[in-house]
Image (spheres, rainbow, N blue to C red):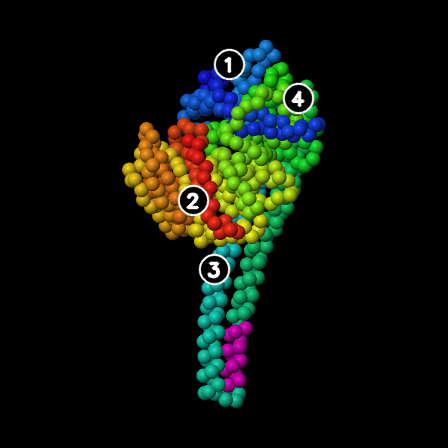
Amino acid sequence: MEEILDASAIILAPDGDQVVSYWYEGICPYSGERLRLPRTLQAEAIAKNLMQSLGQIYPNGIEGKMYGILIAESATGDKLTLKAFSGLFNGKSQIEGWVPPIAGREKVAIEESITLNKLAEIKRELIGLSEIPERWEYEQKSQEYVSQLQVLRDRHQLSKQERQIKRSQLLTSLTGAELETALKNLDKESQLEKMVRRNFKRDLDLVLSPLQDVIAKAEAKMQVLKQQRRELSRTLQAQMHNAYVLTNFAGETRSLREIITEGAMPTGMGDCCAPKLLHYAATHDLTPLAMAEFWWGNPSLDGYKVQGEFYGACAERCQPLMGFLLSGRQSSPSLPICGDFTAQNLQIIYEDDCLMAIAKPPELLSIPGRYLDTQDSVLSRLSQAYGNGREFYPVHRLDRQTSGVLLFALDIDSLRNVSEQFQKREIHKTYEAILAGKVESEQGKIDLPLWGNPENRPYQQVDFQCGKPSVTEFRLLGYEGNYSRLEFIPLTGRTHQLRVHSADPQGLGIPILGDRLYGCQASTSRLHLHARELTLRHPRSQKLVHLQISVPF
């Protein structure tokens, strides 16, 4: 750890390529102007050096989190590089060699410590109440009751059937008082069995009722504790949001609560590396030139963030602060952009009244995710760029890490038509990929059913019992050193189909370069999988439309 922690917080940034691969953006709260800070190839190269240092010190991985670097310029014209981490690093918020946390936490440190201790005590009480022995005893006795009652019912049901047979026999063999007496005896047997069942239930209630009372009191106590936990958490968050103060490049200082005036603020807002870097630069008279954030360590809980990949500002914690933080920043000179980007940094490769095709970049979702930090997507950017005047209907998706042709319908009829073509497998898709090893077969077909374990999302696996049919054709295009360049034609469209068919030993047995989720350990900036071509029939003219984007790797 010494190699990183003893390094200077400000390091001379090497000269490098200034091509932009991503823009950090925010709306100025005062002028309404869109403010932008680029992520350049130079910034990515510096970030990769930091990744290598982290990898040398933690070869077996660490807790996953976001890290970032900021290239800035001092008042004397020197270029400098800052580095920061989100949240805590090995349980510490401030470490030599890294940008310190934003001012404010120390003001509520005592209250935070007290509250966290209270929350820990509440957690222990809740665990204790959830594990009281009466719960286990109630569960065991209830299960025993169900089994015993079923045995009793089965026995009584058999007796009932026997009595029905006896009644039929008595009606044919006896008459008068003798018949009446015999039938009354059968009725008494039936009443006696009902009494046995009632007594069984009564005895059980006498056993279970005291346990239920204890459990009910425990549940009531748990509700009170949970309410106390919510109130303590809200109070602490309010204290921290009022105490955290951010400074922008116009010299203005505001608390988080003053910046975010509406709605609830998520836990950890202000602790992300991007706000730390920009706040530090603003308070030290530095002009930011470029920034790059990446994930390092174990994958995020939702599986979307993996080690060594670059990511933009999260929509939940960072994006709402960007407009304020970038306010007052001097505009940087015009920089070249990777590709011909138009609406919201998206390249439109085809458009008419029915369809629009986008050159989706890697590390951007096709459509928004479930959570606030996964709202940035091709669909949300299109909606923001065109406003409420147009509707965009995604007819298929690409994995977040995959680049290439992404198609949208512009009206419901076109959506239905193209969706039907997908369902009938009439649309031809071609992907190109680089695999992290040498493939022996020149061409072939992979037929392996895929199943997504709900407890390990988004990971997919080959499963011949639960899996859905998944078929891929492939063709070797050539070797590039120890790597293989392949063309994939998916005949089905399962999640991660090409990635699993490549990596699984029953498939090609070699992961796609950069696919850390499925075992690739090579150091690379992206997943080398690209949706190169898509051919369909136009929903109105029925003429073939061939869409193609050159492979960027």
Q: Nearer the viewer, residue 453 or 396?
A: 396
Marks 2 & 3, CB-CB < 8 Å contact? no
The answer to which of 49 and 466 lies nearer the viewer is 49
Residue at 52% x, 70% y is 193
| Quarter that holds the C terminus | top left
**Inter-mark Cα distance, 1 to 2:** 46 Å
- On residue 12, the disc is 1
- Circle 4 — which element? loop
What label does residue 429 carry, if any? 2
Residue 139, given in percent of the width and then of the height, sits at: 52, 52
Badges 1 and 4: C-beta atoms under 8 Å apart?
A: no
Which range of residues does the magenta coloring cover?
179-191
Q: Earlier in the sequence, mark 2 or mark 3?
A: 3
In the figure, is residue 333 to the left or right of 520? Answer: right
**340 or 85, which lies in front?**
340
Mark in the foreground, 1 or 2: 2
Tag 1: Cα neighbours inside 10 Å, few (<14), some, or many (≥20)? few
Q: Which mark is nearer the camera, 4 or 2?
A: 2
